[in-house]
Amino acid sequence: MKKELENKLKKKFPSLYKNLYKENTCMQWGIECDDGWYDLIYNLSSELDSWCKQNELQVNAAQIKEKFGTLRFYFNSANVFTDDQYKEISSIVDKYEKLSGTVCELTGNVGELKVKGYWYKTLCKESAILLGYEDIKKKD
């Protein structure tokens, strides 16, 4: 993701992104996906931030990346969560990770999971053609 977009997230959600670019963390490399998922990550961050404020707890982004064509958002905290709190946080994250399978990682338009060799990516039709990705169904 472009640094300017990462910095917008850090400015809006400073606690969540306190480790962004911090050495010896997985966040030292920034957010490892394309810009099309910015709105998705922004909405996930906003929902997590609201949950944290409501529950007076803190969640930190530990790593954000694309893996097997969908978003992965790993988190940690100095707080100890109850099982229910952990489930609530995980539920928020899971919702957006699943949603990423319908959003083009390049453009933010409607997309679906595509394949090129061993590489998977969620792309809109135009981006898939541009990058040479195929429908998963054709690969089977």
Image (cartoon, helix red, strand yellow):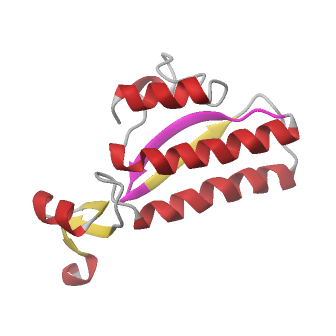
On-image quarter of the C terminus: bottom left
Q: Position of residue 138 (x, y in %)?
A: 19, 82
Q: Residue 137 placed where, x, y %?
A: 26, 83
Q: Nearer the viewer, residue 15 or 81?
A: 15
Compared with residue 84, is residue 48 higher up or lower down, i.e. above or below?
A: above
Q: Is residue 117 visible?
A: no
Q: Residue at x 86, y 41 (%)?
A: 55
Front in this rendered view, residue 76 or 102: 102
Q: Nearer the viewer, residue 127 or 78?
A: 127
Q: Check residue 59 for magenta coloring.
A: yes
Left or right of 96 in this view: 70: left
Membership of 69 in magenta stretch = yes
Residue at position x 57%, y 43% in the image:
74
In this image, 137 relative to 85: left or right?
left
Please indicate whether residue 94 sits to the left or right of residue 82 in the image: left
* Magenta range: 57-70
Q: Main secondary structure of the magenta part?
A: strand
Q: Is residue 89 left or right of residue 67?
A: right
Image position, residue 122 (x, y; %): 33, 62
